[in-house]
Image (tube, helix red, strand yellow):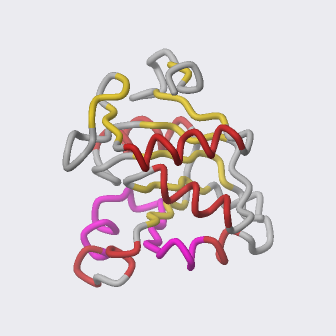
């Protein structure tokens, strides 16, 4: 299994909080953006790669591609940050036998059927079900906007 050091849900994917707070806090050198649409869109891939610090590699992959990639050989020098727009992606990875220790809920804006869940996190019923499933698979799910902020445990809210 690859060296996953942090896993985050964030609608905006790569942006200021990720680049200036999470990447240095976990000494990330590889960001894996997991999104089926972005994985097949060359323009979006170029944009995401341009937003990352020069010493951090960015690899956009589909959920299926990410599942295979993450099960490859462990490399302690590779420090991976997983980013997706929804906890459903991580539920799908767990179904593919990818071992996740924790999932951080960051910015998830109100759109479609999403309703406010905690702070600036909004979820629809499918996302709540995915969070419950992750917790049932012993994945620690929590809210924390930036590393300096206190953790809010999601298990107590679902």
**Front-lying residue, 18 or 158:** 158
Residue 152: x and y in percent read: 50, 19
| In-image side of 56 versus 103 (left or right) | left
Please report the bounds of the magenta region as a residue range: 45-66
| In-image side of 61 versus 71 (left or right) | left
**Front-lying residue, 139 or 73:** 139
Residue 12: x and y in percent read: 28, 50
Residue 50 image-quadrant placement = bottom left
Residue 134 belongs to the span the image colors magenta: no
| In-image side of 45 versus 27 (left or right) | left
Residue 135 image-quadrant placement = top right
Residue 73: x and y in percent read: 80, 72
Q: Name the residue rendered at 33%, 75% in the picture.
A: 37
Residue 25: x and y in percent read: 53, 35
Residue 62 belongs to the span the image colors magenta: yes
Q: Name the residue rendered at 40%, 68% in the picture.
A: 35
**Front-lying residue, 134 or 10:** 134
| In-image side of 134 versus 41 (left or right) | right
Q: Relative to 70, say whether 86 is above or below.
A: above
User: In the image as oriented, which residue stretches furthest toward the left?
Assistant: 111
Q: Where's the N terminus, which quadrant?
A: bottom right
User: In the image as oriented, which residue stretches furthest toward the top?
Assistant: 150
Q: Name the residue rendered at 52%, 71% in the picture.
A: 63
Q: Relative to 142, say whether 44 is above or below.
A: below
Q: Relative to 108, say whether 66 is above or below.
A: below
User: How many numbered markers are drawn?
Assistant: 0
């Amino acid at each position: 299994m690859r060296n996953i050091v942090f896993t985050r849900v964030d609608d905006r994917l790569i942006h200021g909080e990720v680049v200036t707070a999470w990447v240095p806090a976990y000494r990330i050198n590889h960001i894996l953006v997991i999104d089926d649409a972005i994985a097949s869109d060359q323009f979006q891939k170029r944009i995401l790669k341009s937003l990352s610090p020069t010493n951090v590699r960015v690899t956009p992959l589909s959920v299926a591609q990410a599942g295979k990639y993450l099960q490859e050989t462990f490399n302690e020098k590779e420090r991976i940050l997983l980013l997706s727009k929804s906890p459903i992606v991580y539920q799908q990875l767990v179904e593919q036998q990818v071992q996740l220790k924790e999932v951080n809920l960051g910015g998830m804006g109100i759109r479609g059927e999403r309703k406010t869940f905690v702070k600036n996190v909004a979820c629809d019923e499918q996302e709540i079900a995915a969070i419950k499933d992750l917790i049932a698979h012993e994945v620690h799910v929590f809210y924390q906007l930036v590393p300096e902020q206190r953790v809010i445990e999601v298990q107590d809210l679902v």
